[in-house]
Image: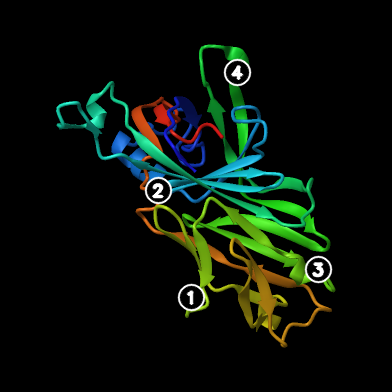
Amino acid sequence: MLGRISATFFCGLLIFSSAGFPQGNKEPVILPSDEIFVDNLAITPLIFTENKGQWDSRVLFRARARGGTMWFTPGGVNYQFVREVAGIIKEDGANINTEQIDQEQNIECLMIRASFDGANPIPVVSGDNLLNYKCHYFLDNNPGNWQTDVRNFEGLIYQDIYPGIDLKYYGKGRQIEYDFLVSPEADISQIRIHYEGIKALYVNAAGELEVETDWGKVTELKPVVYQGEGTTRKKISAQYRIVSPNTFGFELGDDYDPARPAVIDPVIVYSTYLGGGVDDYVGDIVIDDSGYATLVGYTYSSDF
């Protein structure tokens, strides 16, 4: 689904906490420059932010990667990619820079939805590994719409997405990974992931799942499946299984022991041009005497 969207945000991020800056009168606070702050912000690990009312009520959590945003709902995940339109064609045919028009950018939005066929329609979804900083959202001039102390997590878990199977999402650097945590005797053939908003999907010669979109290709690396922990961990042979033109699952080899727990671990990779990193714009940064940073700007990923 393609479209053009525009929004505004104001988010105070308590990234530079007391752990990173001296307190009291012991030492003068050395504040980072705006450039250093933006550089650090760009390389922060993937985080999962809870929805306390700052987004559409269907959203439970949001995670953001470079050029992409993931919206987590009870029924699945919406992957939102944005990219900047090169320019606007005036009536006389001349190109003009979109940034010169009220300092706004024209962008396109691509949405891909992943849902789980036959899954629990109301799974319990909870954050995993609470982080030690929070976000504040001041979305308009009405304090009643402001949301403060919004928690962030390293990941999230869908409990019993299928009978005996949990689904865990987490970040590895700026990539998003998901694991199916399979209990003993659970039926792995239950797992069926359905994509909407794509052109095709297929398994390539390397065993990777390639998802064709209007903008390019999303790749899910060959699934890694293992049983056991630590020195007893054993890798299990596995491959993707195409169920229908837009749906896939997993097939495990004869070395899989259904009497033991298993972890299915794919990795989602999308190319740099699928998205493009223009979903947010920071117009100004203010860093106070304690080292806390407040960002002012606009985002194209603040709505669902």
Give how far across and how far down residue 135 sits, in percent. 55, 32
10 Å crowding of disc 1: few (<14), some (14-19), many (20+)? few
Mark nearest the camera among 1 and 4 is 1
Residues tagged 3 and 4 counted as in contact (Cβ below 8 A): no
> Which of 251 and 159 lies nearest the eye of the viewer?
251
Q: Residue furthest top?
A: 142
Give whichever of discs 4 and 2 has the lower sequence position: 4
Label number found at residue 12: none
10 Å crowding of disc 4: few (<14), some (14-19), many (20+)? few
For the residue marked with disc 4, what is the amino acid?
A: Asn
Q: Give the Cα separation between the discs numbered 4 and 2.
A: 29 Å
For the residue marked with disc 3, what is the amino acid?
A: Ser
Q: Is residue 21 visible?
A: yes
Label number found at residue 204: 1
Q: Is residue 99 left or right of residue 205?
A: left
The colouring scheme, among rainbow, by chain, secondary structure or one colour, is rainbow
Label number found at residue 145: 4
Label number found at residue 275: 2
> Which of 260 and 87 lies nearest the eye of the viewer?
87
Give whichever of discs 3 and 4 has the lower sequence position: 4
Give how far across and how far down residue 103 sits, in percent. 28, 25
Label 2's element?
loop
For the residue marked with disc 2, what is the amino acid?
A: Gly
Label 1's element?
loop
Residue under the image location 29 percent in, 38 percent down: 35
Mark nearest the camera among 1 and 2 is 1
Label 4's element?
helix
